[in-house]
Amino acid sequence: MTYRFTIIGRLKGLNDYIKACRTNPHVGNRLKKDAENTVLWPLTNELRGVHINNPVILKYDFYEPNKRRDLDNVASFAMKVIQDALVKAGVLKNDGWEQILGFTTQFYCDPDRPRIEVTIVEVD
């Protein structure tokens, strides 16, 4: 089975998260919670009632408004937040090795509609 959801806009990058954590641990925690809430809204609306018990492979398609941020800066914090949100929403039991077999990332520019498209492929 394959599931999809889309996060409109873009999430903060890893550099932003590191800077926030260095400022104050509470600031870093707030940034992560805000990002997680940004992910939870489309996740719970588009995958309402989905609970996956089998392992999955995640496919991330990042549509950035421009090429200013490094690819690893774009993806690393976003993937962490998205996977944590999948667990928090109950879509996945956990985000460890048993549940997530791997992931792929692709990057595109779309100045008119930045977004993150997440595809979850259930492996039997």
Image (spheres, rainbow, N blue to C red):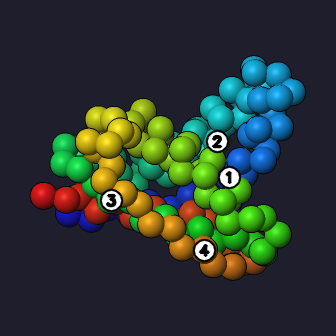
- Residue that label 1 marks: 11
Measure the C-alpha gap from mark 4 to mark 3. 17 Å
User: Which mark's residue is nearer the viewer, 4 or 1?
Assistant: 4
**Which residue in the rendered view is the most extreme toward the left?**
124
Per the image, the residue denoted by label 2 is 35
Q: Which mark is residue 36?
A: none
Spatial CA span between label 1 and label 2: 6 Å
The structure residue drawn at horizontal position 69% and vertical position 79%, both measured from the top left corner, is 109
Q: Crowdedness of circle 4 by 10 Å Cα count: few (<14), some, many (20+)? A: some
Q: Position of residue 124 (x, y in %)?
A: 13, 58
Give, as a three-letter code, the residue at label 4. Answer: Phe
Q: Are marks 1 and 2 in contact (CB under 8 Å)?
A: yes
Q: Which residue type carries mark 1?
A: Leu
* Callout in the foreground (1, 3): 3
* Structural distance between the alpha carbons of marks 4 and 1: 14 Å
| Disc 3 residue crowd, few under 14, some 14–19, many 20+, Cα 10 Å | some
Mark 3 highlights which residue?
Answer: 57
The quadrant of the rendering that contains the N terminus is bottom left
Residue carrying label 4:
107
